[in-house]
Amino acid sequence: MNFVPRDEELLTAWSAGDKNAGKALYDRYFPTVYRFFSSKLADEVDDLVQRTFLACTKHRDRLKDGASFRGFVLVVARNELASFLRRRYRDGAPLDPTTVALADLGATPSQLIYDREEHRLLVLALRRIPLVMQEALELHFFERLTGPELAEVLEIPEGTVRSRIRRGLEALRTEVERLTESPELIESTVGSIAGWAAEIRALADRSLPSAG
């Protein structure tokens, strides 16, 4: 039986200077970080993934005891995204992710051929709601993060996480209603978001580049 080291063991070894342990963590979480950026941007994705892992290397001492590396790397990814959006679309000016949506900025996602109309509607609607809501819904439904994990990544109390997801779903429904007049499509898209998210994730995973 092959021994698979835990994240904590790899992180300890990486912190002690073991580059192979760092490479193992990179390979393990590359798909998660790549999906995070590619659902929001059409270019600079590879660079942002590299920046994220380099920042993890630089700031790995900030990983709190008991925290997960997945949570840590996603916190770093969120920070890298915010910095990129400020540079690219706001000329360095402040960006309020509680009110600004990616569609407002003109940012486009990586191209993905969708199997269903619900896939297309879901992705378009997600980009039209405030960024903090988009991130919460994508991390919950696409990456399957639990309440405590979401609280860690979003850096808010767990009760606020539940509220944000609820408000995010309400905002998502409003945007889907603006995109289609079909009651059936509206109910299918919003009512089955977990299932559609799993299918979109599978489509995205098939087009993932190599982590190397």
Image: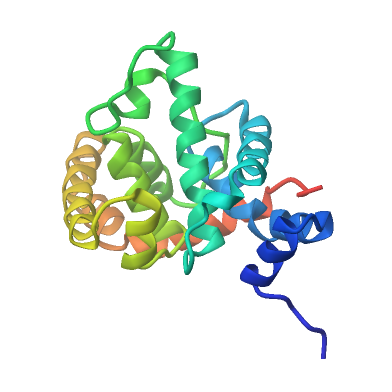
Q: Image height check: is 123 above or below 98?
A: below
On-image quarter of the N terminus: bottom right
Q: Residue at x 22, y 48 (%)?
A: 168
Q: Does residue 149 appear left or right of residue 186 in this picture?
A: right
Taking depth in this image into account, of 107 and 196 the one nearest to the observer is 107
Q: Residue at x 52, y 41 (%)?
A: 77
Taking depth in this image into account, of 178 and 76 the one nearest to the observer is 76
Q: Image height check: is 1 above or below 35?
A: below
Q: Does residue 161 appear left or right of residue 18 in this picture?
A: left
Q: Residue at x 19, y 42 (%)?
A: 171
Residue 17 rendering spot, x and y as whole percentages = 79, 54
Visual colour scheme = rainbow
Q: How many marks?
A: 0
Q: Residue at x 61, y 33 (%)?
A: 48
Q: Image height check: is 194 above or below 17?
A: below
Q: Does residue 63 appear left or right of residue 6 in this picture?
A: left
Q: Image height check: is 74 above or below 95?
A: below
Residue 94 rendering spot, x and y as whole percentages = 33, 18
Q: Is residue 200 visible?
A: no
Residue 107 rendering spot, x and y as whole percentages = 45, 23
Q: Residue furthest top?
A: 91
Q: Quadrant of residue 140?
A: bottom left
Q: Is residue 211 visible?
A: yes
Taking depth in this image into account, of 10 and 95 the one nearest to the observer is 10
Q: Quadrant of residue 148?
A: bottom left
